[in-house]
Image (spheres, grey):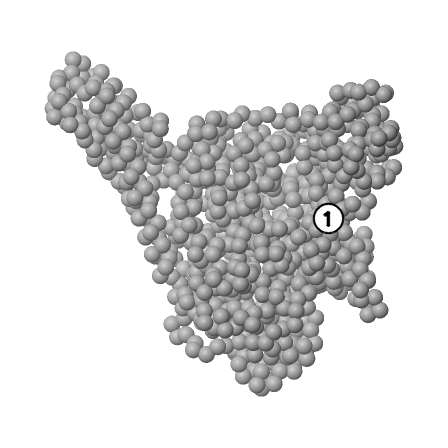
């Protein structure tokens, strides 16, 4: 795809039978995290085919150590020099604010210069910039893009992505279908921490705590304990401890490696850029052995136990084997647990408040290992080191498996119950088992290949340097496009004839090869010496140093000029609507049309458009409700909103709705996920034999000028490049993120004008999850047919009140208090906001409540209990 060609809004559907998995017949890549240099080296030493890492900005793990541009270059060179050659992927997987785009260009240039094998992207604006101005960088889609179906993967392929990281929530069957049909490499998480929410859609930490997961600064509220508040009027203050209802176990899929290989998955990814080098090395080693068939069944448990001593919550396969009824949350305890080694048999007191713990160990132990004990109601295991280890009344250094041992307990300790589970949470033996080589920092360096021609004259020595042709090795940096530089340098000299002209050429080449402390390497050298002169090596060295200084200055200047030129080009797009609107216009979004029945003519007077979710009401009732509403406000003021999440079991119903609604003449749509573009073009045959479109060709074509698509906030628009990308894809308007702050909004609105919608009232979903808190609370799922769970109010340890709402076995967790900017309308108007929106979705409302709140918001009055998110403080 050419980077400067606009994307059509909807293209013709591909024939599924012609698509072949890009990884068919290949072994999957083992992809490891590298939060710092040591972790990168450990991963590569223990068999990772590729590593992924972040720079100091735009990393979804902002609190990891991360890499400078120079450190990145060193790791890339080192990885590419290994046999077999390894790859390095760089993450630019956060949303980017408008003011950060210049810094983003510097980051992308550093990645291109370093020869990074791919860039992992969340923000569609970043993807557009890469595609248009940094085409040497391969695009990989981050899991933060929330791609969870074939439609989403297809859409990303059309946007030029080479690979997509699929949502962790997918079942093996879904992974197999996407890998086989999408025509794009698939990457699947194999091991590591799990978010409660679909990645990229979590707003909890951002809106309630000012630390955005989409900016790499998540505060992990999902790892905190919650209490449930009774919804019974007679027990309004009654609270029940429900524990860590949002704290997920760790994903671990060693038993699914062969199935993932057979499914055509291209890359198996280990999570953990905030983990230690020991953790990374051990985890890579474990899965490398599994992948290569070098882990005998008799060793599997021992290797797994070793890995668990470094860091491990309880393991889960999540939904790999099926969607429902999975124990995926650890509600009792949070944090690192370790590997089980026995149970408490006795606590033996021996005076002075001291005591020893007695048990039979199921694992060999030694002094300075770490132990943890499950303490009921403690929230976290009680942990301590083994300072004194005894067998048979004698102090020992080590204790073999099966020993009856006693361990000194700390003086400060909780009540330890008999029978409590014991874990080894740190093992000195394991720490000694994973050494790895550490090259001296600076030993590997990115170098730019140059050709040098040296000319000897009687009164001077001249040198001409030029960029060498592009090298075969991808790690060698690309020079900025369109700038094949040539540098001339000379020094005065008084040269005399050489005794041996042939030796002079060897000496000259040797002098100019001494580039070890520079950013260059000699690709080609020519000596022009027609008079057979002799030049002292000292003069040649002086000329080399002068030439390299001038090369460095020129290279830096050309890079700066190139980035400035790109910045100027970016500043010219996109532009606000040419026609513009002078008056303020309001939009309303609902998931039940009945919410609007109390609206009067005065309410409707300022409403430009109503957006209605298509997936909530039964289709026959939805069609009737739409016609009824059209009779009140007109069809042209109604838009149909596609859902954020559409899993495989929901696709058929959604497609039937799309076709039926289009057949009924509805042409305005709203996209909340990248999958919408594919859903709006899928052929009738996929809907199933039991559903028929009455007329052939009823679906609007890609070039139907009446077709109108806008985007909702989950297609994040926090910079004008993201808006430009969505406009190129056919969107007529974008919706700004409820995460955003006034400062950034003030930079966007002058550029976007009436093509941007600002949400003023909303029950913003803090979590969207496939895990049910009611099933977690009660210890199991009773099944959809018997489920009576509709919603649950919870309060966190920090005092945050949230409501988890059940929507067809998907959980939407909302703030009890709505997001509302009604008291900031003056600031929005001054910033240039022309389209404002109020949402009434997810939470059950009455028609009277909707009408009352709508009027309060429109009038700029305070809505009781509302919050403003990041509006004043800005998005961090």
User: Can the viewer see residue 141 in this picture?
Assistant: no
Which image quarter: residue 61? top right
Which of the two residues, 867 or 322, is positioned nearer the viewer here? 867
Q: Residue at x 62, y 82 (%)?
A: 599
- Residue at 45% x, 72% y: name it: 830
Quadrant of the rendered structure where residue 545 is? top left
Residues 195 and 63: in front is: 63
Crowdedness of circle 1 by 10 Å Cα count: few (<14), some, many (20+)?
A: many
In the rendered structure, the answer to whether residue 472 lies left or right of residue 18 reads left
Q: Nearer the viewer, residue 817 or 734?
A: 817
**Residue on which disc 1 sits:** 328
Give residue 1's position: percent from left, percent from top. 41, 52
Residue 581 vertical position relative to residue 41 in the rendered view, above or below: below
Query: Residue 606: image x %, image y %?
Result: 53, 81
Q: Is residue 297 left or right of residue 101?
A: right
Furthest residue toward front: 352
The structure residue drawn at horizontal position 70% and vertical position 61%, both measured from the top left corner, is: 801
Nearest to the observer: residue 677 or residue 245: 245
Give the secondary structure at mark 1.
loop
**On the picture, is 405 further left or further right than 850?**
right
Taking the view exactly as shown, the residue that stands out farthest to the bottom is 601
Task: Report x, y in % for residue 17.
Answer: 55, 52
Residue 224 lies, with reference to residue 428, above or below; the image says below
Label tally: 1
Q: Is residue 517 left or right of residue 387?
A: left
Q: Give above or below for 736 relative to 378.
A: below
């Amino acid at each position: 795809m050419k980077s400067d060609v606009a994307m059509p809004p909807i293209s013709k559907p591909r024939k599924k039978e012609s698509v072949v998995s890009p990884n068919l017949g290949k072994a999957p890549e083992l992809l490891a995290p590298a939060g710092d240099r040591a972790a990168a080296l450990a991963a590569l030493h223990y068999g990772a085919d590729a590593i992924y890492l972040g720079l100091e900005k735009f990393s979804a793990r902002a609190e990891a150590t991360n890499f400078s541009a120079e450190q990145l270059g060193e790791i890339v060179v080192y990885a590419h020099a290994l046999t077999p050659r390894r790859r390095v992927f760089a993450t630019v997987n956060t949303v980017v604010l408008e003011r950060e785009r210049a810094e983003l260009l510097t980051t992308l240039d550093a990645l291109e210069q370093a020869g990074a094998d791919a860039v992992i992207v969340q923000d569609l604006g970043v993807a557009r910039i890469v595609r248009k101005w940094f085409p040497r960088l391969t695009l990989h889609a981050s899991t933060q893009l929330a791609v969870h179906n074939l439609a989403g993967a297809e859409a990303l392929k059309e946007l030029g992505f080479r690979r997509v990281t699929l949502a962790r929530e997918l079942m093996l069957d879904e992974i197999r279908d996407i890998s086989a049909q999408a025509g794009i490499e698939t990457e699947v998480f194999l091991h590591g921490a799990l978010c409660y929410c679909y990645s990229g859609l979590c707003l909890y930490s951002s809106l309630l705590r000012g630390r955005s997961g989409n900016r790499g600064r998540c505060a992990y509220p999902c790892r905190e304990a919650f209490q449930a508040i009774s919804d019974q009027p007679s027990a309004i203050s009654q609270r029940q401890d429900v524990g860590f209802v949002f704290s997920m176990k760790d994903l671990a899929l060693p038993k699914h490696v062969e199935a993932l290989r057979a499914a055509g998955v291209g890359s198996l990814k280990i999570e953990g850029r905030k983990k230690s080098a020991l953790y990374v090395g051990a985890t890579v080693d474990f899965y490398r052995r599994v992948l290569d068939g070098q882990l005998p069944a008799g060793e599997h448990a021992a290797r797994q136990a070793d890995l668990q001593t470094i860091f491990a919550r309880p393991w889960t396969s999540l939904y790999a084997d099926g969607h429902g009824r999975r124990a995926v949350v650890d509600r009792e305890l949070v944090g690192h647990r370790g590997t089980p080694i026995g149970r408490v048999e006795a606590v033996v007191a021996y005076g002075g408040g001291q005591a020893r713990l007695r048990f039979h160990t199921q694992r060999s132990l030694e002094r300075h290992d770490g132990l943890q004990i499950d303490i009921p109601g403690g929230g976290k295991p009680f942990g301590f080191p083994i300072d004194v280890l005894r067998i048979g009344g004698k102090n020992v250094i080590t204790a073999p498996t099966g020993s009856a041992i006693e361990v000194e307990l700390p003086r400060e300790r909780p009540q330890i119950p008999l029978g409590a589970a014991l874990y080894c949470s740190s093992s000195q033996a394991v720490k000694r088992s994973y050494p790895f080589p550490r090259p001296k920092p600076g030993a590997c360096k990115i170098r730019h290949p140059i050709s040098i021609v040296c000319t000897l004259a009687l009164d001077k020595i001249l040198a001409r340097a030029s960029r060498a042709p592009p090298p075969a090795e991808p790690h060698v940096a690309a020079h900025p496009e369109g700038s094949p530089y040539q540098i001339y340098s000379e020094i005065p000299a008084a040269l005399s004839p050489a005794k041996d002209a042939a030796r002079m050429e060897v000496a000259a080449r040797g002098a100019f090869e001494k580039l070890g402390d520079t950013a260059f390497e000699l690709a080609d050298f020519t000596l022009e010496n027609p008079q057979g002169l002799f030049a002292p090596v000292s003069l040649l060295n002086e000329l080399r140093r002068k030439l390299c200084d001038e090369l460095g200055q020129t290279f830096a200047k050309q890079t700066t000029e190139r980035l400035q030129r790109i910045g100027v080009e970016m500043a010219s797009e996109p532009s606000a609507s040419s026609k513009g609107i002078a008056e303020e216009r309001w939009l309303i979004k609902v998931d039940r049309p009945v919410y609007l029945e109390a609206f009067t003519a005065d309410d409707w007077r300022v409403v430009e458009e109503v957006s209605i979710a298509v997936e909530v009401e039964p289709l026959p009732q939805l069609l009737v409700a739409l016609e009824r509403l059209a009779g009140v406000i007109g069809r042209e003021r109604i838009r149909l909103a596609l859902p954020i999440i559409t899993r495989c079991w929901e696709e058929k119903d959604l497609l039937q709705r799309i076709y039926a609604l289009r057949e009924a003449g509805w042409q305005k749509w709203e996209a909340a996920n990248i999958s919408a573009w594919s859903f709006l073009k899928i052929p009738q045959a996929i809907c199933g034999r039991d559903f028929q479109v009455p007329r052939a060709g009823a679906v609007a074509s890609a070039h139907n000028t009446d077709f109108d698509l806008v985007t909702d906030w989950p297609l994040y628009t926090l910079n004008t490049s993201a808006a430009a990308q969505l406009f190129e894809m056919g969107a007529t308007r974008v919706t700004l993120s409820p995460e955003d702050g006034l400062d950034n909004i003030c930079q966007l609105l002058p550029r976007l004008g009436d093509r941007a919608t600002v949400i003023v009232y909303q029950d913003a979903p803090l979590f969207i999850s496939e895990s049910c808190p009611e099933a977690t609370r009660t210890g199991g799922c009773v099944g959809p047919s018997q489920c009576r769970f509709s919603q649950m109010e919870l309060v966190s340890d920090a005092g945050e009140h949230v409501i988890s709402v059940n929507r067809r076995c998907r959980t939407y967790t909302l703030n009890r208090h709505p997001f509302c900017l009604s008291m900031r309308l003056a600031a929005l108007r001054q910033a240039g906001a022309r389209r404002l929106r109020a949402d009434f979705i997810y939470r059950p409302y009455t028609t009277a409540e909707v009408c009352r709140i709508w009027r309060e918001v429109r009038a700029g009055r305070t809505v009781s209990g509302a919050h403003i998110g990041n509006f004043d403080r800005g998005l961090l």
